[in-house]
Image (cartoon, helix red, strand yellow):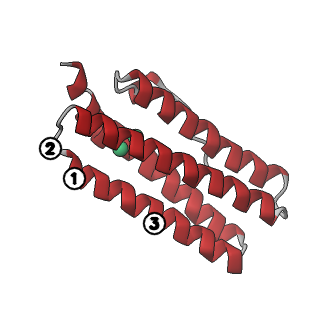
Amino acid sequence: MEKLSWNDKFLTGNLIIDDHHKKLFVLFDQLISVNEKTPDKELEVLKIIDEFIDYTVYHFNAEKEIAQFLHLDLFNEHDSEHSKFTYTVQNFKKRLSVDYSESVKNELGFYIYNWIGFHILTEDKKIFTLTLK
Ligand SMILES: [Fe+2]
Ligand SMILES: [Fe+2]
């Protein structure tokens, strides 16, 4: 699994959203470190995936509240991308519960890595930099 390193290109300019995104990067790094240090500790890895999912849901709700507060009607499609992501990560967790293998873990890492980078740089930036104007 590849680490996500924070870089200011990920800033949306909305302080709350940016703080949440930094925390998501930290949680993802934790997931990778635990997996590297304790590859056999299935329960520990599954627990961190749960924490990651919980924080993701919290963050997506915060984005929704901010968008509703600002009457951003672009948000419906954005919200369904969030739901797809949460659903997919939950499915990976279920798969890992029955097949705790390096290949499934790598697939999960690759999915999160790509989704988060792309989503923040394109979708979140498009929506939340609007809040600055
Ligand atoms: Fe976000
Ligand atoms: Fe988002």
Circle 1/circle 2 CB separation < 8 Å: yes
Distance CA(mark 3)–CA(mark 2): 23 Å
- From where the camera sits, is residue 99 visible? no
Distance CA(mark 1)–CA(mark 2): 7 Å
Q: Which residue is mark 2?
A: 73
Q: Say which residue appears at 65% left-offset and 42% top-offset.
A: 29
Q: Which residue is mark 3?
A: 87
The numbered disc on residue 76 is: 1
Q: Residues within 10 Å of mark 2 (few under 14, many from 20)?
A: few
Residue extending farthest to the bottom is: 98
Q: Residues within 10 Å of mark 3 (few under 14, many from 20)?
A: few
Residue 100 place in picture, x, y as percent: 73, 73
Residue 33 place in picture, x, y as percent: 75, 45
Q: Residues within 10 Å of mark 1 (few under 14, many from 20)?
A: few
What amino acid type should be assigned to the residue bearing mark 3? Tyr
Q: Does residue 126 appear to the left or right of 115 in the view shown?
A: left
Relative to 11, say whether 78 is above or below: below
Q: Say which residue appears at 17% left-offset and 45% top-offset.
A: 74
Residue 103 place in picture, x, y as percent: 65, 70
Q: Say which residue appears at 41% left-offset and 31% top-offset.
A: 17
Circle 3/circle 1 CB separation < 8 Å: no
Q: Quadrant of residue 68?
A: top left
